[in-house]
Amino acid sequence: MINRIKNSYTHTIYASYVGYIVQAIINNFAPLLFLTFASDYKLTLDRITLLTTVNFLVQLGVDLLSAKVVDRIGYRPVVIAGHLFAGLGLVGLVLFPMIMPDAYAGLMTAVVCYAIGGGIIEVLISPIVEACPTTKKEAAMSLLHSFYCWGQVFVVLGSTVFFRTAGIQNWKLLACVWAVVPLLNMFYFALVPIYPIVGERDKMPVRELLKQKTFWLIVVLMVCAGASELAMSQWASAFAESALNVSKTLGDLAGPCAFAVCMGTARAAYGKYSDYIPLKKMMMGSAVLCIVCYILASFSENPLLALTGCALCGFSVGIFWPGTFSIAAKLLPGGGTAMYALLALAGDMGCSSGPTVVGMAANAAGGNLKTGLFLAVLFPVVMLLGLVGLRYQNVELKK
């Protein structure tokens, strides 16, 4: 069995899929506990918001440094370290607040640990899968990105069932259970074959890449992709509970869970029908839908309509992240690993700024999350304008 794992790229892809599930755990477990953290540790909304901000800022820093580190150390030890940090951070949510003098500092330390792991995983998984000798790379990459969505559904559903049966006061036990996933996948990655990244000799120098106007436009798209997605998904549970006055169980299911299902469905559907739908038109239509969804969630007085806006927002942002990577690969084929690291950096800037804008605006409005979500409509608006900007470069973006 071990020899089969060591000699099969299929297991490399399976480990990479689990890696994206780990990423989903890192980004989506703690937000389910935002109100619990606020109650247990006497924290205000802006301090809770800072946990998300630091998470993605640390991932951003890892994105910036990872390309040079990977070139020196190699993919396998770095991706193993990433899973180790992820598991340590999840366990740290339980241990660090108890052993450190300040509970909030303990939470923040745990966030930094799993953010390091998340940043490593985010940068390395895609090129690892891309390097595998598959015959259908586009299908493999599309499925890879959808696993983040299914991982999010898995985290939300599993956590909701646990909270419902064991009680949310036992969340620390669940944190340790989720930590098992990255720790087991760490050993999986120690066994699977990792193939050399192809085309590195022909890659565009970073200095030349940074001179490309197209690259900077794609960076803007990447920031908006991360911000549009995370501004809603990170606050969907708390929004449903506090602003719409629904139960935590219903809030988690109708908020982040429905969001993730819709997002995964959009990615899977476009992966199947991409030959028939121009990418730019798909993304522009999605941006318009995203704007509508944010407005619906922010202004609707009907909880059902507001939750529908939250869920459909997941469908609207589904193509943003992988679509932007596809645009980059098509327009800048010589970008290489450095380009993907920089785009991950831009995406994490968006992932940090989106939830932060919502939280800070809500806090300034006296805790009104509807106000925060309305302000976040700025991100899909800029995404739409950026996609229109590509039109004036006479670029054809069919799949």
Image (cartoon, rainbow, N blue to C red):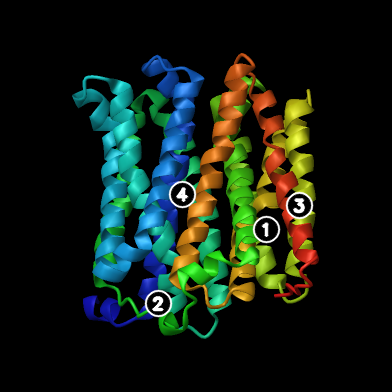
10 Å crowding of disc 2: few (<14), some (14-19), many (20+): some
CA separation in Å, label 4 and label 3? 26 Å
Residue ID for mark 4: 24
> Disc 4 marks which amino acid?
Ala
SS at mark 3 in the image:
helix
Give the residue drawn at x 50%, y 55%: 148
Displayed quadrant of residue 120 = bottom left
- On the image, the x and y values in percent for residue 214 come to 65, 65
- Is the residue marked by circle 4 packed among few (<14), some (14-19), or many (20+) residues within 10 Å? many
Q: Quarter of the image containing the C terminus?
A: bottom right
- Between tags 1 and 3, which lies in front? 3
Nearer-N-terminus badge (1/3): 1
Q: Secondary structure at mark 2?
A: helix
Of callouts 1 and 2, which one flags the residue occurring earlier in the amino acid sequence? 2
The residue pinned by badge 3 equals: 384
* Dot 3 amino acid type: Leu
Viewer-nearest of discs 4 and 2: 4
Q: Quadrant of residue 319?
A: bottom right
Q: Earlier in the sequence, mark 4 or mark 2?
A: 2
Q: Which mark is residue 279?
A: none
User: Can you tell which quarter of the image residue 252 is in?
Assistant: top right
Identify the residue shown where x is 72% and y is 38%: 377
Q: Which residue is mark 2?
A: 10
Of the residues shown, which amino acid type is indicated by label 1?
A: Ala
Q: Where residue 179 appears, x then y in whole percent?
A: 31, 45
Mark with earlier residue (4, 1): 4
Q: Nearer the viewer, residue 116 or 158?
A: 116
Asked if residue 316 lies left or right of residue 229, the reply is right
- Look at mark 1 in the image and give the residue it sits on: 266
- Specify which label sits upstream in the sequence, 3 or 2: 2
